[in-house]
Amino acid sequence: MHIVIVGLSHKTAPVEIRERLAFAPTAMQRPLQKMLELSSVAEGLIVSTCNRVELCAATKEPDLAIAAMRRFLAEYHELSPGEIDEHLYDYQGEDAIRHLFRVASSLDSMVLGEPQILGQIKTAYGYAAEFKTAGLILNRFLHKAFSVAKRVRTETAIASNAVSVSFAAVELARKIFDQIDNKTVMIIGAGEMCELAARHFVTNGVAKVLVTNRTFERAEKLATEFNGRAVPFDHFIEHLVEADIVLTSTGAPNFILGQRHMEDVLKRRKNRPMFLIDIAVPRDIDPKVNRLDNAYLYDVDDLQGVVQANLKERKKEASKAEAIVDQEIGQFHQWLANLEVKPTIIALRRKLEEIRQQELDKTFGNLKNLSGKDRKSIEAMANAIINKILHQPTTALKQSQNDASGNDYVDAVRTLFDLPAPADDDNEIRPLDDPGQEEQGVT
Amino acid sequence: MTVNILLFKVTLLVYFVATLFYLVGVISRRDRFRQNAVYLLIGGFVLHCLTLAVRWITTGAIPVASLHESLSFFAWSLVGIYLIFYLRYRTVMLGAFITPLALVLMIIGTTTSAQAPALNPMLDSWWFPVHVTLAFLGHAIFAIAAAAGIMYLLQERMLKSKKFSGLFYRLPSLDTLDSMNYKCLTFGFPLMTMGIISGAIWANSAWGGYWRWDPKETWALISWFLYAALLHGRLTVGWRGRRAAIFAIIGFGFLLFTFFGVNLFLSGEHSFRNFTGQ
């Protein structure tokens, strides 16, 4: 049995193509069953997100299956194969295993290390399991992929460090204040951008929210939403003394907060540090404020820079992750190879031979006065027993090669007779992980 | 005595390996190295305790009378205080500063005579070990403050300039580092003060005068004023962060000079030569 994958991703196809080849997540039954109708496909799975479509199958004839799946992908979406061929990639054998492991570990994602993809693959697998298009091989394969992804997340820092601007702001705040759950956020200008960034701070547990805006009603509205307090715009500087974190995005054409103001505020705060985030363009806070001790001023570009730095850091972690993927491929590949019928029969016969030899030795050891002829006939009897026992299972195994149940038989024989199989530790079904709070909108 | 020297050398070796682990851990983003460095350091510390205990038993006096002994004792206090901080703050990075410092002290220690000093009747006072122990514990705490100060300045620089190196992801937050500075000050300053007072009492019993303005006393007093100013600034004017970090670094520089400079370059009652007659 072989694993094959046919697919396309943000790396090979523009969004106009991807959207035409996507499968609706709510109606997976029909495409899955259609895919299984392909004669060369034994088991099938479809992963469809806004960044990729992957058809994954277990098959005996990898080349045939790939060709059929390429055609299926086009025809299902009522396109001619020529239209999409250049955007498709296909993998088989070890390459296919590596590909899915990498995708699940978010090494192939547009935003390296983003956590959604694992959840999306789990959902896709859920459908395949529900509609029974995934069998022994894909079950094992997908669970292995989940465990690889888990290893990558826990053993590397690929998913640490924020890669969205709002979340980067929260992380920077943690680098300054350590904990933000006893801190006060002040929102100046109740614009949409501010609201988004503020929401990140609120969900990460800041203690208090102050809102100010030129139109006081708007400030009040936002304040109730965040369970905070609105303060009049005319003397917001008075209230800055309370604020540890300041978010500004007013439409003011000039700086509304200068170095002088801030010097004064910091002094009244007894130099307790302040983190100022200026999302407004044109900017609201004089950049000179950053030169003051204990004031840290970031504008949109600065935050973007932090995101870039974090992405670079993730790339460095990616090489560690690739090494983990490489390690795990071998194991799964070995398990797959063991599903072959012939080696199983040989292993089974060897096992029984071993038992026969051991028992004969034991018996002859006890019966020392047997004649050569007696020994011969006892040996012959033992041999005959083994052959008779083996006859039916061997025939059944050989026959099963030609139908879909073959792998189940092989697996059963290997389990029942405890035949030496490769170490494979991750067989259990893991619950869905919470994909984490970061990053929005990869669907 | 040979057992003692062997123990000393093994301790030094373990500190050396721990330092290597810290450096590798900091340079190559391998967390496992830094974690193992902590374990090595704990092992080294246990050995070091043993070294000092053996020395104490064989010489019959708390081992701080010769330069060799006090270097070893200083390094021991440093590692011990760091490990206490580690329990509280879990900052592995701090060890990357403290361990090399302890190692350097130990290496300097190997170049000095490890022979037990002839017991000087002057040292035969309870005030002597009290004075030295308090002083070294104070020094060790201020060393932590200085290391936290260096980390603070590095971290602050990155946050201000918005250019982040790999170090950024491993250093603790500014707030943690600043609170370390304050903690060190609140423990270190009383220890230092009591160290100076106990020293004065001892001086009175040994030489018949509390204060003689010998270079070490003068420099110690200067350092004391520096830390007093920092503590005062922190409590009343709200000094913190960068300024407190710089003060802690300068203060420790003064302490190091008080310890080494005075012993090596200047002469006075505190020079070990006077103790041992070498």
Image (tube, coloured by chain):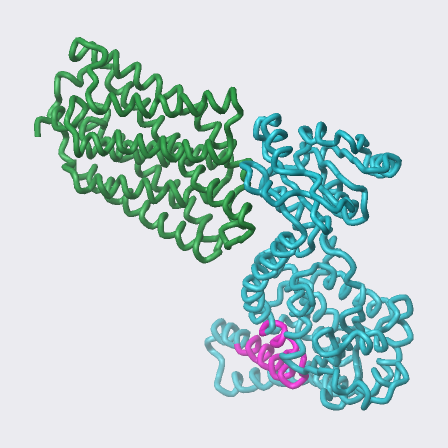
Chain colours: A cyan, B green
Spot occupied by residue A25 in the image (x, y as percentages of width and height) = 87, 67
Residue A354 forms part of the magenta stretch:
yes
Residue A38 placement, left or right of A311: right
Residue B11 can be seen, yes or no: yes
Q: Nearer the viewer, residue B230 or B111?
A: B230
Residue B244 forms part of the magenta stretch:
no
Q: Does A260 appear above or below B125?
A: below
Residue A101 placement, left or right of A29: left
Q: Nearer the viewer, residue A163 or A273?
A: A273
The answer to which image quadrant residue A111 occupies is bottom right
- Quadrant position of the N terminus of chain A in the picture: bottom right
Q: Residue at x 48, y 27 (%)?
A: B183
Spot occupied by residue B153 in the image (x, y as percentages of width and height) = 46, 41
Q: Tell me where the magenta segment starts and ends, as one range.
A: A330-357
Q: Residue at x 24, y 21 (%)?
A: B217
The answer to which image quadrant residue A34 occupies is bottom right
Spot occupied by residue B164 in the image (x, y as percentages of width and height) = 53, 53
Q: Does B243 appear above or below A86?
A: above
Name the dominant secondary structure of the magenta segment. Answer: helix
The answer to which image quadrant residue A170 occupies is top right
